[in-house]
């Protein structure tokens, strides 16, 4: 009998933001797999690390940072083959996913290769977007607001149109697009409605009004939230709350 | 010294989808508060019920179902006053929230009344939207897709425009708007790309392609996901996966 494949959402970074379910499966699965950069540690594995027994088989899936230059399909084909051998041998396999597996996650590439052949379960996780709103102390969206999630790599006209049309906006994958996106938000007169969150829920988390960001670039794990909602959080991010620490 | 106020995301319904952090705070807080309808049980309390010791002070916040007919501001003013007495007495207060507190949640009404006066922490939760994508076995959004979250009460023209403009759409608060929204999606030729999820993650969960829904109405806790993404999940929701059960 084949093993079961899990796509395991681990949440945004704080190990305590794993769900009870993800924790149970993580600690019971004989095989765990996770995306890893070609140099440096795997963020997904770091989130899970304090819960690992050391007796589990680990399968890093090495995805080069500049993946567009590499044959990524080959990487996932090879990873799926490796995981299928464990599944065929009857071992459950848990694929560790930062945030939520199906919210802009790379788990889909394994899912589309394996889910038709093996029992598969996705365990949803807390997304960085929800955690960012929590950290900023502002609603992500409320009442009948339309919330648009907009990837930073889109071009200026596209991003502007999305911001214009929605009551609430989360700009993800900001990274090297930060300066351009900030200028765009400024041109639209919305800087005072925008909050910035970096490495949310981790000890090195930074949260501030967008206007207060000094740097002209941002790390990959950063996000800008804009809330234009009728509830009038006009005083800027986090100003209304005496927020607790990230832990 | 005053107590601390928590907005505690409990996830979409399965008690195992609480985070470890929410579980810790829930079991330690001397006072818990939760929204409750004027008749019947509180869904938030039901999610948490197996973890309650019986020794906690419980504060139901009764919000009539047809809240638009009632002075809701008065309800939250009164609830904030009650909670402030516990906080002033030095007790931590955990407000239980279905899903994520700041994702269309009513916690914001307490937050705006209390967060300026008391230390406040939001614990993000798994949203029903992420859980619905997991249950359907389809990505919510991927790569550079724009994801729009669209409340069902919006009018036809507005909903159509949002669906047209986005690569991925989650229509929330479907409820009594179901028949109208389904007709709209059908007119747009997108029924085959749409999945329906009801009471996600609960034992009574129902998931199916939108085309297979026989009823002409839907419960409040239902959602329609449309995925037009380039990855081509054209074969319809969940068809590619041998999904596990909701538990």
Image (cartoon, coloured by chain):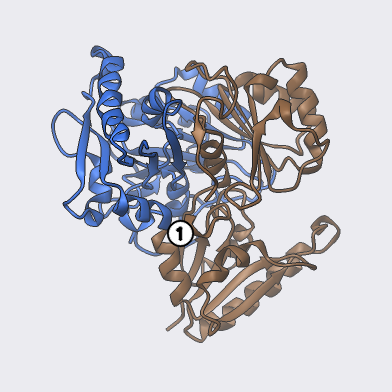
Chain colours: A blue, B brown
Label 1: which residue?
B123
Q: Is residue A214 left or right of residue A138?
A: left
Q: Is residue B172 above or below residue B235?
A: below
Residue placed at 28% from the left, 17% from the top? Answer: A72
Residue placed at 70% from the left, 29% from the top? Answer: B210
Residue A165: image location, x then y, percent: 62, 28
Pick whichever, B236 or A220, lies toward us: B236
Residue B126: image location, x then y, percent: 50, 50
Residue placed at 49% from the left, 23% from the top? Answer: B145
Q: Determine the residue located farthest toward the right in the rendered image.
A: B69
Q: Is residue A222 left or right of residue B101?
A: left
Residue B4 in sight from this viewpoint: no
Q: Is residue B18 above or below residue B219?
A: below
Q: Chain of mark 1?
A: B
Q: Is residue A42 above or below residue A115?
A: below
Q: Quadrant of residue A171?
A: top left
Which image quarter holds the C terminus of chain A? bottom left
Residue A139 in sight from this viewpoint: yes
Residue B134: image location, x then y, percent: 51, 38
Q: Secondary structure at mark 1?
A: strand
Q: Quadrant of residue A111?
A: top left
Residue B49: image location, x then y, percent: 57, 70
Q: Determine the residue located farthest toward the front in the rendered image.
A: A1
Pick whichever, B8 or B1, lies toward us: B8
Q: Quadrant of residue A90?
A: top left
- The residue carrying pointer 1 sits among few (fewer than 14), some (14 to 19) or many (20 or more) residues within 10 Å by Cα, namely many
Q: Is residue A33 above or below residue B14?
A: above
Pick whichever, A2 or B127, lies toward us: A2
């Amino acid at each position: 009998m084949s093993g079961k494949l899990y796509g395991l959402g681990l949440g945004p970074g704080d190990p305590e933001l794993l769900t009870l379910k993800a924790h149970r499966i993580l600690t019971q699965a004989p095989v765990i797999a996770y995306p890893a950069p070609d140099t440096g540690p795997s963020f997904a594995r770091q989130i899970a690390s304090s819960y690992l027994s050391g007796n589990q088989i680990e399968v890093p899936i090495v995805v080069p940072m500049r993946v567009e230059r590499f044959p990524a399909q080959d990487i996932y084909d090879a990873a799926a083959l490796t995981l299928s051998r464990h599944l065929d041998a009857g071992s459950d396999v848990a694929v560790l996913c930062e945030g939520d597996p199906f919210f802009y996650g790379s788990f889909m590439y394994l899912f589309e290769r394996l889910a038709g052949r093996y029992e598969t379960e996705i365990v949803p996780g807390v997304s960085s977007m929800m955690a960012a709103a929590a950290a900023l102390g502002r609603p992500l969206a409320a009442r009948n607001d339309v919330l648009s999630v907009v990837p930073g790599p889109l071009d200026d006209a596209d991003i502007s149109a999305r911001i214009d049309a929605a009551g609430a906006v989360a700009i993800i994958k900001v990274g090297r697009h930060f300066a351009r996106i900030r200028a765009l938000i400024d041109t639209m007169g919305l800087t005072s409605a925008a909050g910035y969150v970096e490495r949310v829920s981790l000890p090195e988390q930074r949260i501030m009004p967008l206007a207060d960001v000094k740097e002209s670039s941002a790390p990959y794990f950063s996000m800008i939230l804009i809330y234009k909602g009728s509830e009038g959080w006009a005083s800027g991010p986090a100003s209304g709350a005496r927020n607790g620490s990230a832990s």
